[in-house]
């Protein structure tokens, strides 16, 4: 059995044992003062309406500002980060093919991290004399994950709003455990290494950053493609549709340009089951039931079939616009009849409207 003062080491040791290269823990009572600035930023972000239609972020505001409303017994928090694969070819071979955010490649990370964090805590309990209670949170819980990860020393929050580790970069999944035992540790933040760099801010095609570290979701391709269901007309004009490029799910641009992500691409077992189809013709002819089956155990499951077809129609129109003349004609000839048919028969009104727009683009360039 470990001695009381070792609780912090026990947590980190178990996190390493179950494969998390980055971990840290801290007590809530020792962190509240530092967390206050994060709370204020969050409240002001919601007040500005930058969450768009993600109503859960507003409804869960009080819980996000006070982890004890999420788990009343909480005395401390263990924060972990899991780097995911960054090999581009898993995701998309070129700019004129359908593009997916890297984190979507492979198995759904929520489940994997959740399972491993439970194992971490079972191991900790085996070595701790007092009964512990805990709650594992990954992404969907009302926890300000980046703020707590930064306070736990896992990285700093970049101008692109993402948590960045000096060695591992920002292609990271975050997870936390709220725990009934104290660690005796307060915040141990790392310095912010962004310095004078502002590559992410200028690379964002839709000018989604209202200032460094503050994102208006309603301007973000990731929000448009992953979160916003139904019509996009209330958010996007013709020009904005073009700025979406060929992203069909998520967007990685503000990470691709970050100097801390320039290391050689890495593979990770989580990304080992490529379920992301990048062939236009295959995607256009895919029945809804096949899409559901293919995305069932992946994070792409969040994007519903009609939402995906809507995104696909916009992306294909952009691929046609941006292609070199020869490749463009090939694309038009090979896909025209499929697009014509989708513009007539797609069961979803929003997707059908986007297919009609796509067809207009085909005609304009024929
Ligand atoms: C809602 C959400 C989104 C929204 C809004 C994003 C945003 N920037 O807020 C949308 C749909 C746009 C989105 C997109 C993406 N997301 Co998202 N998203 C979330 C979610 C569910 C909540 C985030 C939130 O609360 N936002 C509200 C704002 C105000 O919070 P915030 O930006 O974190 O800011 C806080 C702190 O960062 C801090 N802060 C920021 N700057 C500064 C500066 C100072 C000086 C201080 C003191 C504090 C501070 O203050 C704020 C208040 O606490 C989290 C999971 C979670 N439960 O936290 C995942 C999460 C943030 N997303 C994640 C990912 C991977 C993405 C994408 C990369 C996916 C993609 N490739 O398409 C993009 C990246 C876009 C971007 N540049 O942010 C990861 C981020 C991992 C990382 N390395 O940081 C998370 C943590 C999920 C996870 N568990 O792994 N996401
Ligand atoms: S994810 Fe894409 S659209 Fe969103 S802020 Fe980053 S670069 Fe801009
Ligand atoms: S691109 Fe530059 S400014 Fe943006 S997060 Fe990375 S280091 Fe910071």
Image (spheres, grey):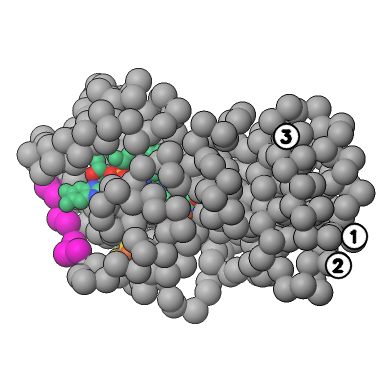
Q: Quadrant of residue 66?
A: top left
Query: N-terminal of the two: label 3 or label 2?
Result: 2
Mark 2 C-beta to ligand 2 under 8 Å: no
- Residue 362, position in %: x, y? 79, 54
Q: Is residue 124 visible?
A: no
- Residue 30, position in %: x, y? 9, 40
Question: Regarding mark 3 in the picture, which secondary structure is present there?
Answer: helix
Say few, some or many: other residues with alpha carbon within 10 Å of mark 2 (under 14 / 14 to 19 / 20 or more).
few
- Residue 140, position in %: x, y? 44, 34
Say few, some or many: other residues with alpha carbon within 10 Å of mark 1 (under 14 / 14 to 19 / 20 or more).
few
Between the C-alphas of marks 1 and 3, the distance is 21 Å
Q: Please give the name of the residue rendered at 88% of the width and 52% of the height, measured from the top-left corner.
A: 336
Question: Regarding mark 2 in the picture, which secondary structure is present there?
Answer: helix
Mark 1 C-beta to ligand 1 under 8 Å: no
Q: Which residue is mark 3?
A: 353
Say few, some or many: other residues with alpha carbon within 10 Å of mark 3 (under 14 / 14 to 19 / 20 or more).
some
Q: Please give the name of the residue rendered at 25% of the width and 23% of the height, measured from the top-left corner.
A: 62
Between the C-alphas of marks 3 and 2, the distance is 24 Å
Q: Please give the name of the residue rendered at 19% of the width and 45% of the height, measured from the top-left corner.
A: 26
Quadrant containing the C terminus is bottom right
Query: N-terminal of the two: label 1 or label 3?
Result: 1
Q: Which residue is mark 2?
A: 330
Quadrant observed for ligand 3 in the rendered image: bottom left
Q: Nearer the viewer, mark 1 or mark 3?
A: 3
For this orientation, the residue located farthest to the front is 364
In this view of the protein, which residue sits in the foreground, 237 or 92? 237
Q: Please give the name of the residue rendered at 71% of the width and 53% of the height, measured from the top-left corner.
A: 317
Q: Which residues are magenta?
A: 185-192
Left or right: 231 as drawn, with respect to 139? right
């Amino acid at each position: 059995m470990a001695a009381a003062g070792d609780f912090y080491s026990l947590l980190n040791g178990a996190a390493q044992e179950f494969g998390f290269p980055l971990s840290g823990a801290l007590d809530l009572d020792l962190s509240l003062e530092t967390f206050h600035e994060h709370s204020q930023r969050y409240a002001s972000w919601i007040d500005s309406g930058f969450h768009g239609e993600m109503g859960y972020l507003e409804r869960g505001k009080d819980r996000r500002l006070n982890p004890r409303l999420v788990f009343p017994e909480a005395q401390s928090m263990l924060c972990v980060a899991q780097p995911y694969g960054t090999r581009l070819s898993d995701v998309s071979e070129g700019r004129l093919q359908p593009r997916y955010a890297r984190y979507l490649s492979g198995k759904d990370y929520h489940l994997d991290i959740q399972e491993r964090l439970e194992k971490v805590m079972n191991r900790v309990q085996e070595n701790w004399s007092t009964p512990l209670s805990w709650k594992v949170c990954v992404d969907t819980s009302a926890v300000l994950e980046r703020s707590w990860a930064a306070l736990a020393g896992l990285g700093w929050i970049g101008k692109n709003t993402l948590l960045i580790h000096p060695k591992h970069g920002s292609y990271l999944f975050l997870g936390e455990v709220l725990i009934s035992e104290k660690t005796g540790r307060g915040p141990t933040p790392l310095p912010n290494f962004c310095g004078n760099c502002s590559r992410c801010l200028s690379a964002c095609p839709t000018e989604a950053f209202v200032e460094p570290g503050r994102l208006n979701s309603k301007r973000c391709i990731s929000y448009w493609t992953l979160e916003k269901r139904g019509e996009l007309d209330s958010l996007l004009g013709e020009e904005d549709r073009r700025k979406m490029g060929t992203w069909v799910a998520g967007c990685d641009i503000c990470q691709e340009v970050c100097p801390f992500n320039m290391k050689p691409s890495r593979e990770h077992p989580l990304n080992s089951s490529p379920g992301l189809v990048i062939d236009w013709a295959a995607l256009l002819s895919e029945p809804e039931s096949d899409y559901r089956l293919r995305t069932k155990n992946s994070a792409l499951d969040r994007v519903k079939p009609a939402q995906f077809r809507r995104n696909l129609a916009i992306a294909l129109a952009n691929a046609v616009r941006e292609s070199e003349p020869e490749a463009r004609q090939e694309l038009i000839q090979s896909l025209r009849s499929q697009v014509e048919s989708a513009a007539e028969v797609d069961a979803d009104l929003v997707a059908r409207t986007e297919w009609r727009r796509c067809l207009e683009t085909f005609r304009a360039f024929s």
